[in-house]
Image (cartoon, helix red, strand yellow):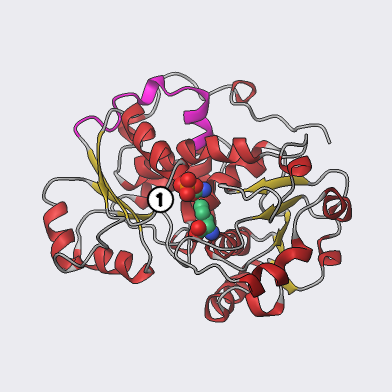
Amino acid sequence: MPRPNDFSAATALEGRSILRVADLSADEIRAVLALARTLKADYRPFRDALSQRALVMLFEKPSLRTRVSFEIGFQKLGGCVTFLDHRNEPIGVREPVADYGRNLERWCDVIVARVFRHETLVGLRDHCRIPIVNALSESAHPCQALADAQTLVEHGIALESCHLAWLGDGNNVCLSLMELVAIMGGRMTVVTPAGHRPCAKLVGEIQSIAARTGATIALADDPAAIRGADAVYTDAWISMGQTDCPEKIAALRKLSVTPEIMKIAGPNARFMHCLPAHRGEEVVDAVIDGPRSVVYDQAENRMHAQNALLLALLGAINGALPSHPPVDASRSGIVATPA
Ligand code: CP
Ligand code: NVA
């Protein structure tokens, strides 16, 4: 296993696209997280790492965290960013997705896209010679999962032995976390109403990964299954692009994360949410604003984890390696929060 400050395995990511967590190996994830931790401690050695590099962002859906963390993050590394708002005109309407990509690759070094159809990302990746990064599709949110992994580690929870509990809709964020836990060999309990389980085809792929790594991925419909979890995670019941459905809300109501639900998990369980939260629906104020909530650490870590990934995809790790000794972990905010 690589040492905590060893990010050499991330050099293998140069030129690759990341559309889902399963595009990364366990060693690559550990290396990206090690680099993210290094960045978080001190950006100064990396401030010119992406000088003369350009990022184009294509967003078909609204965003706060993803947009701001990519834009500010890339600029902190010395690069420049262009944002193309596709909320009123899906990518591929004015001209084919392939042509879109063939144009963009002539001007920029990496594309970050948030789309309704995962296939749009596949089209860009298959017709571009530059890396494509998924900033959320209907089936995956890999950058969120990387930031969440960084947050778990910071709070003293090892990915290889964590027990992560999911309550709510079996959505894109849930699937990316399932992939992450399956790859890292941990345990995840996904509690959803029977009709709102994650996509069966992707669950099958995730179970194949888990069979190789020794991870345990369990689907359940009773919150009692989350007993002993290190963290309880939830997300919006209706994701962007889904139609509001009163029956779905009614079915999910019993999975709202309340203090009583947190009690089932146990006294040390952290509360996690990718945000935006719908207070009073999937989580109540007492939990999200409570002492065990790490939601703003997750939001902050979006920038560090994504920046680490971008440095790796753009082959900018070695040139940016600080000449001084590895960072002191005590400066990186890696502290376990008392229960
Ligand atoms: N968590 C997340 O992706 O937030 P935004 O939708 O605001 O980008
Ligand atoms: N599942 C949510 C995540 C938002 C960050 C959505 O897709 O809308």
**Image height check: is 32 above or below 179?**
above
**Image height check: is 56 above or below 19?**
above
**Image height check: is 231 above or below 40?**
below
Q: Position of residue 299 (x, y in %)?
A: 55, 39
- Establish whether ligand 1 lies closer than 8 Å to the Cβ of label 1: yes
Q: Which residues are magenta?
A: 35-52
Which residue of the protein is positioned furthest toward the front in this rendering?
Answer: 246
Taking the image as drawn, is residue 190 in sight?
Answer: no
Taking the image as drawn, is residue 91 in sight?
Answer: yes
Q: Which residue is mark 1?
A: 62
Is residue 33 found inside the magenta-colored segment of the image?
no
Residue appearing at x 37%, y 51% in the figure: 12
Q: Position of residue 156 (x, y in %)?
A: 72, 39
Residue appearing at x 43%, y 39% in the figure: 308
Which quadrant of the figure has residue 335?
A: top right
Q: Report the amino acid beneath label 1.
A: Pro
- Mark 1 crowd level (few <14, some 14–19, many ≥20, 10 Å Cα): few
